[in-house]
Image: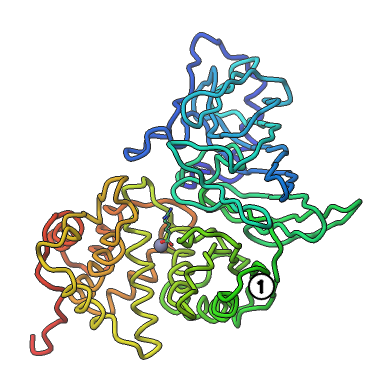
Amino acid sequence: MHRRILAPGALAAASVLLAIPASAASHSPGAPGIGDAYYPAYGNGGYDVSHYDLRLKYQPATDELEGTATLLARTTQDLSRFNLDFLLEVSEVRVNGVKASFEASGEHELEITPKTPLAKGSAVTVVVRYRGVPSSKEAYGFTSWHRTPDGGVGANEPEAAWWWFPGNDHPLDKATFDVSVLVPDGSQAISNGTLQSTSSRAGWTRYNWRSNKPQATYLATLAVGRFDVTTGTTESGIPVVNAYSKDLGDNYGAARASIERTGEIADWLSGYFGPYPFNALGGYVPNTTTGYALETQTRPFYSPRQFAGGTNTSLVVHELAHQWYGDLVSVAEWKDIWINEGFARYAQWLWSEHEGEGTAQEIADYVYASHPADDAFWTVKPGDPGPENQFHLAVYDRGALTLQALRNEIGDDAFFAILKGWPRKYAHGNATVADFRTYAEQVSGKPLAALFDTWLFQPVKPAGPAALDASA
Ligand code: ARG
Ligand code: ZN
């Protein structure tokens, strides 16, 4: 859903338009990409999804996934055909109940031609029946579906959806999700949001998860495995569900000791960022060999080896900070990644200060000093790092240095007002780096073009983010 465009009730009102016959000649294909400069083929043009209903069955022994995806969408142009992003084998597509022709194309496109063209502004229901072995699929030479000894997990950024559901895979098109997964008894299916119900029959158990707030497609996750599940409630009343693979070995204790602090950390972050934006919370650790974590909405994904060195509450802080900075407010384009990673990193610095392990300024000074001027670190521009450097350390660390420089320039009152105001201003929507500069200038009343240009867009080491001179 494009929050800025779609008014409540637009879907219902638009369905009336379906009755109006349109002349096919004026209809054209939806673009195969949504228009992202870094990833031209990601997402699609011509429609906007408001809801995904995924009804799936997964066999952990073989990594076979099958099911039906039902997408509720609205057209944003007259459409002769449109694309979804997807990799698995499709057996049938229906558009508004009628069989449509379809064809795989490109690296991850599913081209759908409805029997009759679709008029701009119509409500459209797309049903896709499919099956496949996600771990066997590669796009651009990699897979985002990770096989585990007890099943599999889909989690990656900027792309993970293609391996398990068809969609409009770009943060600009957020939607609500129902994810229902049938797994053999003894396995669990973990996803985002709230576990609405489970039911068991004939050796299989169905898990019904619901995300009732708009969610970017890359933030949707599914893991099937054998998990220990813990439940609780935050002081602010948010239900917490965490899941730990039973097979984490030596990392089990440190992972669980860290992630069990999720509720406490979310409550602490809400002091800086405003109320926790969703109605479910948690974290999960599948038995994967991947090395990264991901801020999958409401329930971040963590990798076991991130706890090999002991507890890592700082990582939990990072992924939970993303719930505001990344999930509630999402990038408008992937080049805007600093509005996610710079802030999640800065939250870790604030946590360090809270834990008595060094102030944000001390960490900033240390990070700044640890990269000499000739370090390639300074050649990456956090404000436009390029797709190859989207998750470069500089996006995180120079990104957080930028915030320390901003804090020192405008003072704590304005700085912390901005940290709290931004998630509310762009809640459930998208924003750009330029939007942040504009907002920071509004709140602080200071011109900040030079500061942001120096810290985010110049491929050289700036002068240090020195604290405000107390005598000034
Ligand atoms: N947003 C994630 C984090 O910082 C980063 C994911 C990086 N993705 C990857 N495939 N390494 O928590
Ligand atoms: Zn991050």
Residue occupying the point 28% across, 74% down: 415
Residue occupying the point 32% across, 51% down: 390
Q: How is the image coloured?
A: rainbow
- Give the labeled residue for mark 1: 239
> Residue 210 placed where, x, y %?
68, 55
| Residue 83 visible, this orientation | yes
Q: Quadrant of ligand 2?
A: bottom left
> Residue 172 placed where, x, y %?
45, 44
> Residue 78 placed where, x, y %?
51, 21
Left or right relative to 380: residue 328? right
Q: Quadrant of residue 15?
A: top right
Q: Is residue 319 above or below residue 49?
A: below
Q: Which secondary structure lies at badge 1? A: strand
Q: Is residue 282 above or below residue 108?
A: below
Left or right relative to 439: residue 458? left
Comparing 151 with 47, the one in front is 151
Comparing 15 with 355, the one in front is 355
